[in-house]
Amino acid sequence: MKKFLGSKKIKTAVFISGTGSNLRSLVKYSLLKKAPIKISLVISNNSKAKGLIYAKQKKIKQIVYKFKKRTVDENKILNNLKKEKINLICLAGFMKILSKNFIKKFKGKILNVHPSLLPRYKGLNTHKRVINNNEKFSGCTIHYVSSKLDSGKIILQKKVKVKKNDTVKTLAKKILKHEHILYPKAIKKIFINL
Ligand code: GRF
């Protein structure tokens, strides 16, 4: 990736499926003058995703693709990304798996946030598995997306203590707060600190 020199911000698309709290933190960050990204597009597979309401408030273009036919929708997405001159994709709670072909077309330009200390606890229900295994620590990871699920190169991680009385809900809430800090930090690491 090219270093951000303070003039032209990198046009970014955020892919969401739900609440969009990471979208919110990314948008807030992107509005800082020193931030290297500008969020120009939000894509969702879920028309009821709360994050879309926020995107609308912030006047960010949004498109919903149901992903019923993945290849067809991915091609439409690729066309839109091209049209909007998107150079970076941030997956933020996006619950669909992108095809190898799609990832190849955006190689090295797709980031994801995962609520565990990868490579541990890939996939879904991370907090439940962490608690069931009596782990003392969990956390979150920002990583590049590769064709293997939750396996791309790690950019940043934050370790979070799991307390004895933590439930899936309290742990998820605690980790989510760190995700909001870590995602912008990872973007800064990629484009500013290099
Ligand atoms: C986050 O915990 C993220 O790590 C996981 O899904 C959650 C999405 O939250 N993949 P939000 O939609 O950003 O609020």
Image: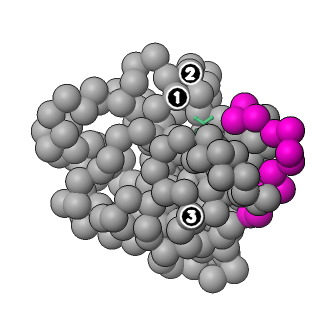
| Sequence-first disc among 2 and 1 | 1
Image: magenta residue range: 158-169
Q: Is residue 91 or residue 131 the one in the foreground?
A: 131
Q: Are marks 2 and 1 in contact (CB under 8 Å)?
A: yes
Rounded to the nearest whole Å, what is the CA distance between mark 2 and mark 1? 6 Å
Which circle marks residue 120 in the picture?
3
Rounded to the nearest whole Å, what is the CA distance between mark 3 and mark 1? 24 Å
In the drawing, does residue 4 fall left or right of residue 134?
left
Q: Which residue is mark 1?
A: 18
Nearer to us of marks 3 and 1 is: 3
| Sequence-first disc among 3 and 1 | 1
- Horizontal and vertical percent position of residue 182: 71, 58
Q: Farthest residue in the front direction? A: 133
Q: Is residue 180 or residue 52 the one in the foreground?
A: 180
Above or below for 37 versus 190 = above
Q: Is residue 69 or residue 8 the one in the foreground?
A: 69
Q: Which residue is mark 2?
A: 50
